[in-house]
Image: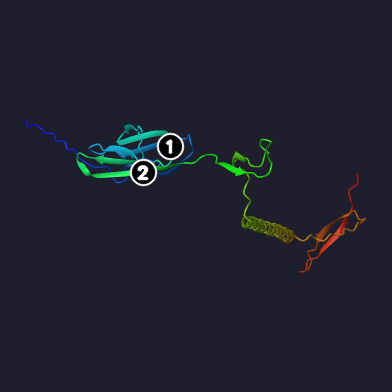
């Protein structure tokens, strides 16, 4: 009995051009003390590729490594502060064993950290009263305050207001025109309905005037058998009396 030999074929390949994938990609704007979740993923390929994340600053950050199905992942949750302003990460995939000359990369950042409020210093030359603290400043001193966000609504552009008024006027005119058409159609329907009824009803027959008579006798017709012309004669029959 002949034996069957099994042949195992291993296919070597590098991840396709859509990898690696950086999230979020490109420039990032964050507030101080906010959390930034970053990820760099790639197809594992065969042999498995290496994912390296580097930064343009001299600092050490620990990225976590994991894999799901056929995807390799590096992730980092970073609390953004002033020190992270301008920070940029570069994620690179390589396969030094069989694909030494191949590598691709993507970028996270730069990170721009913007303050929530901007302190401003205003010199004062006359005594002024701060409405928020009810305090008075004297000449030669400086008042340092935090600029509050402007909550006033911006006025509508004049062109937008004019467009809204024109559209409102046009809609009003169109509504009036439609109401007139509906009323005219209803009036026309009533006229046509009245004409149809007048044509379908027959003309009433003229009334017949019945003349009263005092003759209560019944006249029985009598047929004459003489000659060729027949004449009908009537004679009176007295009513029966009880």
Of the image marks 1 and 2, the number of the one nearer the N terminus = 1
Q: Which mark is residue 107?
A: 2
Q: Residue furthest left?
A: 1
Q: Residue at x 68, y 56 (%)?
A: 172
Q: Position of residue 121 (x, y in %)?
A: 58, 42
Q: Position of residue 137 (x, y in %)?
A: 66, 39
Taking 170 as reference, is 132 above or below it? above
Question: Dot 2 lies on which element?
Answer: strand
Spatial separation of the CA atoms under disc 1 and disc 2:
19 Å
Q: Quadrant of the C terminus?
A: top right
Taking 9 as reference, is 178 above or below it? below
Q: Nearest the camera: 91 or 118?
A: 118
Taking the image as shown, residue 53 lies to the left or right of residue 95, namely right
Q: Nearer the viewer, mark 1 or mark 2?
A: 1
Q: Position of residue 169 (x, y in %)?
A: 67, 58
Q: Residue furthest front?
A: 140
Colour scheme of the picture: rainbow
Q: Quadrant of residue 217?
A: bottom right
Q: Quadrant of residue 77?
A: top left
Q: Residue at x 24, y 45 (%)?
A: 102
Q: Quadrant of the N terminus?
A: top left
| Circle 2 crowding by C-alpha within 10 Å: few under 14, some 14–19, many from 20 | many
| Circle 1 crowding by C-alpha within 10 Å: few under 14, some 14–19, many from 20 | few
Taking the image as shown, residue 1 lies to the left or right of residue 69, namely left
Q: Residue furthest bottom?
A: 228
Q: Nearest the camera: 117 or 16?
A: 117
Count of numbered marks = 2
Question: Dot 1 lies on which element?
Answer: helix
Taking the image as shown, residue 184 lies to the left or right of residue 74, namely right
Q: Nearest the camera: 212 or 170?
A: 170
- The residue carrying mark 1 is 83
Q: Quadrant of residue 183?
A: bottom right
């Amino acid at each position: 009995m002949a034996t069957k030999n099994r042949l195992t074929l291993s296919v070597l390949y590098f991840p396709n051009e859509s990898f690696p994938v950086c999230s979020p990609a490109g420039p990032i704007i964050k507030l101080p003390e906010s959390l930034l979740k970053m990820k760099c993923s790639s197809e594992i390929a065969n042999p498995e590729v290496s994912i390296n994340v580097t930064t343009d600053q001299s600092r050490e950050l620990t990225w976590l490594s994991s894999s799901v199905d056929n995807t390799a992942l590096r992730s980092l949750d970073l609390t953004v502060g002033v020190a992270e302003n301008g920070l940029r990460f570069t994620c690179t995939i390589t396969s030094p064993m069989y694909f030494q000359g191949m590598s691709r990369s993507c970028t996270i950042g730069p990170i721009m950290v913007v303050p929530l409020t901007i302190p401003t210093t205003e010199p004062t030359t006359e005594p002024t009263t701060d409405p928020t603290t009810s305090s008075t400043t004297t000449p030669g001193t400086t008042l340092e305050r935090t600029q509050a966000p402007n909550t006033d609504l911006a006025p509508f552009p004049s062109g937008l207001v004019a467009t809204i008024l024109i559209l409102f006027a046009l809609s009003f005119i169109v509504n009036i025109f439609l109401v007139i058409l509906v009323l005219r159609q209803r009036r026309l329907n009533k006229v046509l309905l009245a004409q149809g009824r007048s044509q379908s009803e027959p003309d009433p027959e003229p009334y017949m005037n019945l003349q009263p008579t005092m003759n209560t006798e019944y006249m029985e017709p009598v047929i004459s058998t003489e000659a060729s012309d027949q004449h009908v004669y009537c004679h009176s029959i007295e009513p029966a009396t009880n």
